[in-house]
């Protein structure tokens, strides 16, 4: 049936690396590609390369459960994630690419009076920051998602927090859209090119060693997500980051049943339905440190148990696929977008299990930092030295949902 489907033009060029660039962005995931795009398009910089050790989008950008939202509590986070949401809302027009951004709503379930209080506080903070939030009663929820097990013995469902503008986006469509956009603005996207070292002279970056030879660079921005610890160690840095696997699952295609995203924080479970009908769900990270892009069965069992506790009818659906991605878990659950002590070397990472929703703002803010030398106004709190100064941004510690 695909016989007539010939003559497709690749979405981006496949250039040979040049001997040097003004900017080298390491990592062809969502954040690296978005950074290169905004550097070229918005900040009008040129001579930019993205180096990717595999193929574009082979990392977490193509492995996540696609949830986007901006209902954060803390002042360090909320303006940044709302900036990202605004960029999501215009992304398809910006890139002229169908990223299937779908604001179908995100519901965080609550199970106790104290959790209702904390969700109400978060909703007020979100509204004060100019974003949207609505507290849902149990009755509201029964009308919207009647198939949930409301009387679940351990965590009876008492209500929820809805962000109507939250939802999902087609994850690899986002990578492809940014890649094509960057390429159209002259960025060299270099695949199968692994960074193997930094050339640093007198405290200043001069270039990078790669599996395809040495490449000179004026500035280097590292955005390698789960590989952050390994890559920055090559520059002699030890980060407040651990790598863990996060797994996700998709069922066979079913008729539409889920209106939006539902998160069950008490049980470490979140679920949405793809446009193809698959139930896309995930749970918690695997407990041990790892650089393997595959996980272990105890977490699969835990996620399945949580799914059954929340919506028992999921037990009738057949699991189609499961996979794992490498999470760069920071010590306070919030990211880092900052310069380093090495002149010209910049770092973007620590996205934990929630960096997909940040892709547009992260790319924009990192490009801002690389091009202007100063942090973007929404990303000022994401300093690397906040851990030693004690200014952590502990969003998870406030009881907010992590994903
Ligand atoms: P990546 O796509 O991993 O990009 C990093 C790239 O760097 C990779 O392509 C890698 O190959 C490359 N690289 C590594 N080392 C080198 C090197 N030495 N040289 C060159 N290149 C190198 N977030 C949400 O907001 N919502 C969700 O619903 C959500 N669900 C998730 C579910 C799962 C199962 C997973 C795994 C993640 C989820 N996330 C979610 C998190 C989100 O996907 C990540 O935080 C985000 O994608 C990380 O940024 P990135 O896209 O740039 O990473």
Image: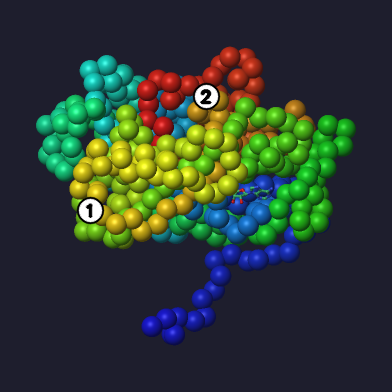
Which element is circle 1 on? helix
Q: Which mark is residue 97?
A: none
Side of 200 relative to 279 (left or right): right
Which element is circle 2 on? loop
Of tags 2 and 1, the one toward the viewer is 1
Where residue 156 appears, as percent x and y from the top left, is 20, 28
- The quarter of the picture where residue 114 lies is top left
Question: Residue at the location (62% across, 27% down)?
Answer: 240
- The quarter of the picture where residue 300 lies is top left
Instruction: Say if residue 106 shows up in the picture.
Output: no
Side of 38 relative to 23 (left or right): left
Where residue 228 appears, as percent x and y from the top left, is 64, 39
Question: Residue at the location (43% across, 85% down)?
Answer: 4
Q: Which mark is residue 332?
A: 2
Where residue 153 appears, as percent x and y from the top left, is 19, 29
Residue lying at the far top in this picture: please name it. Answer: 390
Q: Tag 1 or tag 2, which sits nearer the N-term?
A: 1
User: Which of 225/283 is in front?
Assistant: 283
Q: CA distance from mark 2 to mark 1?
A: 38 Å
Question: Residue at the location (63% across, 48% down)?
Answer: 27
Residue with the mark numbered 1: 316
């Amino acid at each position: 049936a695909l016989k007539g489907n010939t003559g497709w033009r690749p979405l981006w060029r496949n250039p040979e690396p040049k001997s040097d660039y003004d900017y080298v962005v390491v990592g062809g995931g969502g954040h690296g590609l978005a950074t290169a795009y905004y550097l070229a398009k918005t900040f009008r910089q040129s001579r930019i390369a993205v180096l990717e050790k595999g193929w574009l989008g082979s990392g977490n950008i193509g492995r996540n459960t696609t949830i986007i939202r901006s209902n954060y509590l803390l002042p360090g986070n909320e303006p940044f994630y709302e900036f990202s949401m605004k960029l999501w809302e215009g992304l398809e027009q910006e890139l002229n690419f169908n990223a299937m951004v779908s604001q179908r709503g995100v519901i965080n379930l609550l199970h106790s009076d104290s959790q209702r209080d904390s969700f109400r506080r978060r909703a007020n903070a979100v509204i004060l920051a100019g974003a949207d939030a609505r507290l849902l009663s149990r009755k509201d929820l029964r009308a919207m998602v009647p198939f949930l097990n409301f009387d679940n013995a351990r965590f009876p469902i008492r209500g929820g927090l809805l962000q109507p503008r939250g939802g999902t986006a087609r994850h690899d469509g986002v990578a492809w859209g940014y890649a094509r956009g960057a390429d159209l603005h002259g960025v060299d996207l270099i695949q199968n090119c692994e960074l193997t070292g930094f050339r640093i002279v007198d405290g200043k970056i001069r270039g990078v060693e790669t599996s395809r030879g040495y490449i000179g660079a004026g500035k280097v921005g590292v955005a390698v997500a789960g590989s952050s610890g390994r890559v920055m160690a090559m520059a002699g840095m030890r980060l407040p980051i651990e790598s863990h696997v996060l797994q996700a699952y998709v069922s066979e295609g079913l008729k539409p049943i889920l209106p939006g995203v539902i998160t069950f924080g008490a049980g470490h479970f979140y679920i949405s339905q793809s446009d193809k009908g698959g139930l896309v769900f995930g749970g918690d990270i695997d407990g041990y440190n790892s650089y393997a892009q595959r996980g272990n069965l105890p977490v699969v069992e835990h996620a399945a148990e949580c799914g059954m506790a929340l919506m028992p009818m999921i037990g009738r659906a057949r699991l189609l696929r499961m996979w794992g991605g490498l999470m760069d878990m920071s010590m306070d659950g919030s990211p880092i977008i900052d310069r380093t002590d090495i002149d010209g070397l910049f770092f973007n990472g620590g996205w934990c299990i929630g960096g997909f929703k940040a892709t547009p703002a992260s790319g924009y803010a990192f490009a801002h930092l690389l091009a202007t030398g100063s942090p973007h106004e929404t990303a000022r709190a994401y300093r690397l030295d906040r851990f030693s100064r004690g200014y952590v941004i502990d969003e998870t510690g406030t009881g907010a949902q992590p994903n």
